[in-house]
Image: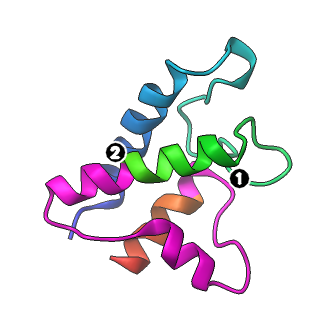
Amino acid sequence: MPSKEKIIDIIFRCAEELNRQLSEERKLILEESTVIAGKNSPLDSLGLVTLMVCIEGHLNHLGIRINILDKVSESSNFPFTTIGEMSLWLLGEI
């Protein structure tokens, strides 16, 4: 199982890839406290799904198969709002 640091690294790499497609005011700051979901997020639903798909791809390269969107939709409440919360949630799901 990957460490929290490895998961954060994957999320940051995917955020960097996504930032190339975003306008300056919507770019994600590469910090654990950056909001990626909810009303204070610079991402729209497509941006969040794009980030999730990228993360899934990187995890797949490590031999970890997860469908983040399916897992999120199974939750009664959205399980994370920040990059740090997402990394902890992912660690609990894989």
Left or right, residue 40 beside residue 64 = right
| Horizontal side, residue 36 vs residue 3: left or right | right
Q: Position of residue 70 (x, y in %)?
A: 50, 75
Question: What residue sits 63% from the left and 44% below the top?
Answer: 46
Picture quadrant of residue 79 = bottom right
Which residues, given as a range, are shown in magenta? 55-84
Label 2 sits on residue: 10
User: For the residue labelled by badge 2, is the local secondary structure a helix, a strand or a loop?
Assistant: helix
The extreme right residue here reads 39
Res. 12 image quadrant: top left
- How much space separates mark 1 and mark 2, taking CA atoms? 17 Å
Residue type at the position of mark 2: Ile
The vertical placement of 59 against 65, above or below, is above
Figure check: 77 above or below 32: below
Q: Residue at x 42, y 27 (%)?
A: 17
How crowded pointer 2 is (Cα within 10 Å; few <14, some 14-19, many 20+) is rated as some
- Residue 18 in the image: above or below residue 34: above
Farthest residue to the top: give it: 24
Q: Position of residue 4 (x, y in %)?
A: 36, 59
- Crowding at label 1, few (<14), some or many (≥20) Cα neighbours within 10 Å? many
Which one is nearer the viewer's eye here, 11 or 49? 49
Q: What's the residue type where badge 1 is placed? A: Ala
Give the image quarter of residue 22: top right
The magenta stretch spans residue 62? yes
Q: Residue at x 79, y 54 (%)?
A: 38
Q: Which residue is identified by label 1?
A: 37
